[in-house]
Image (cartoon, coloured by chain):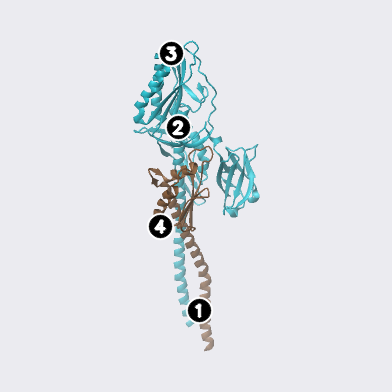
Chain colours: A cyan, B brown
Amino acid sequence: MVILLAVIITAVIEATVLTNFMYRSESVIRAEKETTIIKAINIVEFAKRSVSQALAYSFNQAAYDVASRGGYFNLTNVHSLSCVPYWREYSEEKYPDFEENLKNSTLSVFDTYRAFLNSINVNVPKYEEVYINRNDDDTLTVSVSSSGNLNYKSSAFEINDVSDSKADAKIKLFKLFDVGKEVSTQVANELDAATSYSDAVDKLKDLEDGLNSVYKKDEIEVSLEPSRNLGSSSFAIRVLVKITDKSSELVFFDFKEGNVKERNAQLNFYALSGKETVQAETDECKNIDYKNLVISIVCGNNNKCEENKDCICKVSGCSAGYIELYDSSGKKIASSQVSHETGNGILSGEFMKPKEDVFGVKLICQTGGSSQAQIEII
Amino acid sequence: MKGQIEWALIGPIVTVGMVMIIIIPIIFLRVHLMEWVKYEFNYNNAQLTLLTLLSSTYEKRTVSEIISEHLVLKNNPDISKILSSKLDKIVPSECYKLTASNIALVESSCKASKYFADTKIVFPFNGKEVGTDLELVID
């Protein structure tokens, strides 16, 4: 009788305790799923922030390059000298479609950021369209769109989010071009009215002073730099026109100087005119290749390497250097050379062990630059 | 009589033993899950803290822009002050460490080691690096 009672009591206790544990365990498992989803949403949010910031940097750099090249992205088949185009050769005016050039250039720069952004575990699509909106204060708002989505995939679920992104740009590019066209016409008028080379130089100086007093309120500075007399019997002058946005200094990379620092955006172009007709002096201008300038490394398939197999890392912007492999505690475990022939580096399969989960990879270029990535073993 | 008492004791002991055999693994499982969820919850908090920090503004510029430009130009001697003024407000324990490319941008007097969050931060175009890892550790 006592045994029976003890068994019944313990069975009741066991049932109660088990039910309680099972119920709570279910809550805990549900909480685990929720935290995993929240973690993924946060990662997508990080990606969206980075895309917007990368867009702003891409647009700023594109604007700086297009402006310094007189509104052109590609100067092939355009009369130019030291990568500055002629907007005017006597009565002939040639203005670039700077907005279209700016859009193409923005997409080219943004492509250099895409590979890096994809390593956040969120797939950033290739953007197809760029829209530029001029604000009332002459600053710009740039937005991009793509038919693809921002995509995060895990074994349990997938997140798709709209990939469209928007960024503000302080650069007053449209204003610079408006001023540029006006200055180009006025320079031609002054040169046509001049009677000699020295008279033309004086008139240009007066014009420069007048323009600077007009545009001071817009924080725009105009510089007119006349060449020597290019004519032999009378005179001909090539004027280098520089129109600078003094309202804000932004971080730009200058391809001629090969360095990055805070600079003002500047529109440059030439105007050639005078009493004597001479041929415009021109030279060849190389196209800007953003991808080969930026050092980047992508290993395997989108930074996912297969277990126990050699993993090929594609390197861009670095012809000589080496790749270092780090374990999850930050300890260096291997290094390999970047091949001169293929431009790739190979991580040996002996290190591709799943227990590490994630490896750190660092590309160190002989030029001093470096790039990092994280690889996952699958 | 003595034999009956022994049987009466053995019965509950065996039953309790069996119950414990069933329950102990469940307790361990639950404790493990609870710890894991607690860690994940706080990891998410570290992630949100980092997200809040990067989205916050200082003199009309986002903190992420300030960090990016400082990492490229090394031009902001006040970076540590700016970041600590923000982190002191959003990290309740006031224990934190923010690093980029393994270099500490800001570190509190107490050593943070519990919860970790990381992301990628993009640089202004500089012809060399596109961006780097940004890591936040908080307690």
From the viewer's perspective, tell me whether residue A297 is left or right of residue A59: right
Label located before the other in sequence (4 or 1)? 1
The amino acid marked with disc number 2 is Ala
Q: Label 1, on which residue?
A: B12
What is the secondary structure assignment of the residue under circle 2? helix
Label located before the other in sequence (2 or 3)? 2
What is the spatial separation of the Cα atoms under label 4 and label 2, in whole angstroms?
42 Å
The amino acid marked with disc number 4 is Pro
Identify the subunit bearing mark 4. B
On residue A89, which mark appears? none
From the viewer's perspective, tell me whether residue A332 is left or right of residue B82: right
Q: Label 3, on which residue?
A: A196
Q: Is residue A283 above or below residue A311?
A: above
Q: Foreground mark, 1 or 3? A: 3
The answer to whether marks 1 and 3 sit on the same chain is no
Identify the subunit bearing mark 2. A
What is the secondary structure assignment of the residue under circle 3? loop
Residue A32 coordinates in the image, percent (x, y): 47, 57
The amino acid marked with disc number 1 is Pro
Q: Nearer the viewer, residue B15 or A4?
A: B15
Q: Label 4, on which residue?
A: B92
Residue B10 coordinates in the image, percent (x, y): 53, 81
Are dots 1 and 2 in contact, CB under 8 Å? no
What is the spatial separation of the Cα atoms under label 1 and label 2, in whole angstroms?
83 Å
Are dots 1 and 3 in contact, CB under 8 Å? no
Q: Nearer the viewer, residue A14 or A295?
A: A295
Q: Is residue A76 above or below residue B80?
A: above
Q: Nearer the viewer, residue A261 or A301?
A: A261
The residue sitting at 51% across, 69% down in the picture is B24
